[in-house]
Image (cartoon, rainbow, N blue to C red):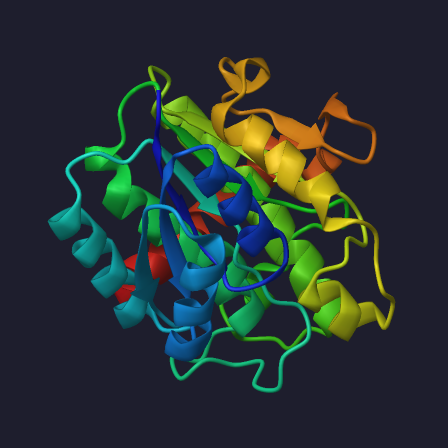
Amino acid sequence: MTKTVLITGATDGIGLLTAKNLAAEGHTILLHGRNKGKLEAAAKEVGGTTQSYTADLSRMSDVTAMAAAIRKDHTHLDVVINNAGVLKIKDTMTTDGLDARFMVNTFAPYVLTRALLPIIPKDGRIVNLSSAAQAPVDLDAMHGRKQLDDMGACAQSKLAITIWSRELAKEFADGPVFVAVNPGSLLASKMVKEGFGVAGNDLQIGADILREAALGASFGDATGKYFDNDSQRFAQPHPSALDAGHSAAVMQGIKEITNTLA
């Protein structure tokens, strides 16, 4: 049975390869990208049945507009793969005064997912890209009141998306599935090449686990879990994601910030 799958950050790296793999299986792929030209090129490369959506995830107005466009075009969405992410970028603060790494890696996928939940069935899935690099969230930094270096911001924003994956799994206990996935460390993505200056490991490692998380039987009852592809198993995330007080504070911050921007 074919599915309709949204993949953010689908113009290169793991997102693009995952889109190609799923399109080859006959699934309908909704491609997101920030650059219209790159998005058009990606759609041609992916082939099959695709639809493209352009949005700058550092701008909340773009995020909400994309969600509205998807809901206008589709009454049913089986899977959301929140793949888009940033590490090293020129402008680290958004026009709203927030850390752009938190905005793209944490807030945008949160708002997008919540806006799309009405068209996602109970047996649908939300696959959130986490990382082996996770760190406790500095609430001042998350609110844009404190500057972080690239790795600090990325690690904290990845812990934050892991936290909201777990918390939304509790809120929507009867489905869909919410799962956070570390697709593999130092894969050959643009983010890794720019951030670490290394070629990286085979992207197929990440694309294969995202395909399994999106459609495979092993993730069918995995809501609220964290999958570490480095160890190829469901594992515990960073201890701070399991700390009830820290999780509650992070969720309160996410809700306050996103409600202010809405």
Quarter of the rendering occupied by the C terminus? bottom left
Residue lying at the far right in this picture: please name it: 198
- For residue 237, side relative to residue 230 (left or right): left
Q: Is residue 251 above or below residue 187?
A: above
Q: Quadrant of residue 51?
A: bottom left
Residue lying at the far left in this picture: please name it: 72
- For residue 39, side relative to residue 149 (left or right): left
Residue 192 locus on image (x, y percent)? 76, 64
Residue 141 locus on image (x, y percent)? 59, 68
- Residue 12 seen by the camera: yes
User: Depth check: 157 or 206 in front?
Assistant: 206
User: Depth check: 31 or 226 in front?
Assistant: 31
Look at 59% across and 50% down and name the residue there: 17
Q: Is residue 194 above or below residue 151?
A: below
Quarter of the rendering occupied by the N terminus? top left
Look at 38% across and 46% down and name the residue there: 48
Q: Is residue 121 above or below residue 23?
A: above
Residue 229 locus on image (x, y percent)? 75, 33
Look at 17% across and 56% down and name the residue there: 68
- Residue 57 seen by the camera: no
